[in-house]
Image: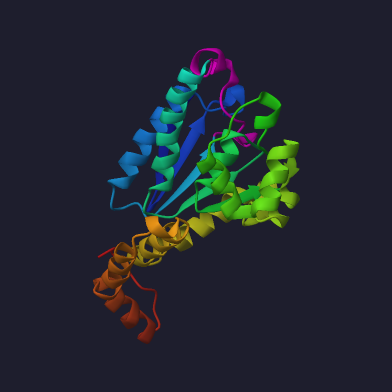
Amino acid sequence: MPGKVYVERRDAVATLVLDHRERRNAISVSMWRELGLACASLRDDPEVRCVVLRGAGEEAFVSGADISEFGEARGSAEAERSYDEISGRGFGAVMNLEVPVIALIHGYCIGGGAALALACDLRYAADDASFAIPAARLGLGYAAAGIKGLIDVVGPADAKEIFFTARRYAADEALAMGLVNRVFPKLELDAAVSEIADRIAGNAPLTLRAVKRAVRDLSLEPQQRRPADVHAAVAACFESEDYREGVRAFLEKRTPRFRGR
């Protein structure tokens, strides 16, 4: 079986589940395609305020790309270009979601799994999580965009160590280098992430969207930035009903009820 991707909903929080348990949630070509479709459905749903991305079960987030497909899907430079295009659309679909995206990481987070976690805005790991990018042990070339994504999070020195050694890093090591935001005891991770996601989903959607857009813009090269778009997103916050609701709620000492407009 090539695995599957599905969505679970709880109020304003959507959970994207990568399910390929017999291969520790290794992500197949068909799963990359399904991931893009699932993200498109969430992007078009105004009720979704936060997305959690996780692997099925508690053994692995994603143990990497499905190596059983390498002979066919990545057996030549031409096949690799096709694979990169398909997987790139999957990465892009996650990165381009306008709502905050949380990676919930149990167990193995290897190769493409680590890259997928980096495509999320926040990363929370169980204390049994392990991280690696073993490209140098497989002889794979790694696209500059993927390397930049890692550099943006951990810095160039740690990024080079991760690639050069291809070794596995424990959760506490990942935390020390900033690869994850926080580490929780394994039995507490799901509840902790649920609480964080609920807190995020209760905040003003337009503000979160503006912050995410600004952070994304500032990560680009100066000539690629679009400050007018960032300014427009900020202006939309001040012109919104949510801004007026937030001020009223603060003055009235109550929880605001944001509607995303």
Quarter of the image that includes the C terminus: bottom left
| 6 sits left or right of 138 in the view | left
Residue 167, visible in the rendered structure: no
Count the numbered circles shown.
0
Say which residue appears at 27% left-offset and 46% top-offset: 44
Residue 95: percent from left, percent from top = 43, 47
Q: Is residue 98 left or right of residue 130?
A: left
Rendering quarter of residue 115: top right
For the magenta stretch, what is the residue range? 56-75
Residue farthest toward the front in the current orientation of the protein: 223
> x, y percentage for residue 81?
45, 25
Q: Residue at x 75, y 38 (%)?
A: 165
Instruction: Return the x and y of residue 123 as percentages of the image width and height.
Output: 57, 51
Q: Is residue 26 above or below residue 113?
A: above
| Position in image of residue 31 (x %, y %) | 45, 27
Q: Is residue 61 magenta?
A: yes
Task: Name above or below for residue 170 compared with residue 194.
Answer: above
- Residue 48 seen: yes
Identity of the residue drawn at 47% across and 63% down: 199
Task: Using the image as rendered, state which of residue 53 and residue 223 is in the foreground.
Answer: 223
Pick whichever, 29 or 71, lies toward us: 71
The stretch drawn in magenta includes residue 17 = no
For this view, does 45 lie left or right of residue 120? left
At x 50%, y 48%, the residue is: 120
Q: Quadrant of residue 160?
A: top right
